[in-house]
Amino acid sequence: TRKKWNWGGYASSLAITFSVLLLIPLCMFAWVSYEDRLQELTTFAGIELSATSADVKFLKGDPIFQLERPEQKTHWRYQDTLNPGNLIDIIFQNGKVIELSFTGPCEYCYNVNGFGNNTPYSDIVSRFGEPAETIVSKNELEHRINYPQYNVFYVLQESRVTRHGIYH
């Protein structure tokens, strides 16, 4: 009976099945690692850095808040229609977007390279390394850490992210 069985066919089927079962998790791991890599960001909340104020108005409508700042900068604020506690702030200089940021209670909204609000400082440093620049507020309660190679910044209070975004 041993000669009647197709042992070569069973062995090759088993080898193919084993290879496929091994290859699928490896491909999934490779894809997740690729998607999770640090990258330079130029778009945030659907708005490109260097977009014009007309582009932003077309995409988001009228801001709920508008303020002229020194150095020819303008600050616009938009409120999330689904969650009014979530705010998008946009800074323009000479009519072009130079900074976009998110503030709000949502920890998973508009994450920047995997991190959002309430993320501990230690998690950011373990992934990015030490910041290229740290700006401390006058009252020393707030720190802004910048990573210019990725166009990313995080604002922290009590060692946790309270605002984050991209800048140029």
Image (cartoon, rainbow, N blue to C red):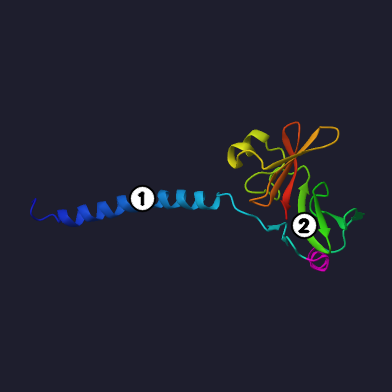
Which amino acid lies under the numbered mark 1 shown in the image of this protein? Answer: Leu
**Depth check: 101 or 28 in front?**
101
Q: Residue at x 62, y 46 (%)?
A: 114
Tell me the SS state at disc 2.
strand
Question: Which residue, given by chain and number where applicable, does mark 2 sit on?
Answer: 98
Q: CA distance from mark 2 to mark 1?
A: 48 Å
x, y percentage for residue 80? 80, 53
x, y percentage for residue 122? 64, 33
**Depth check: 83 or 147 in front?**
147
Question: Which residue, given by chain and number where applicable, does mark 1 sit on?
Answer: 21
Examine the rendered structure and indicate whether residue 137 appears above or below residue 6: above
Q: Which image quarter holds the C terminus? A: bottom right
Label whose residue precedes the other's in the sequence (2 or 1)? 1
Q: Which stretch is magenta?
A: 52-60
Q: Nearer the viewer, mark 2 or mark 1?
A: 2
Which amino acid lies under the numbered mark 2 shown in the image of this protein? Answer: Ile
> Does the magenta segment cover residue 59?
yes
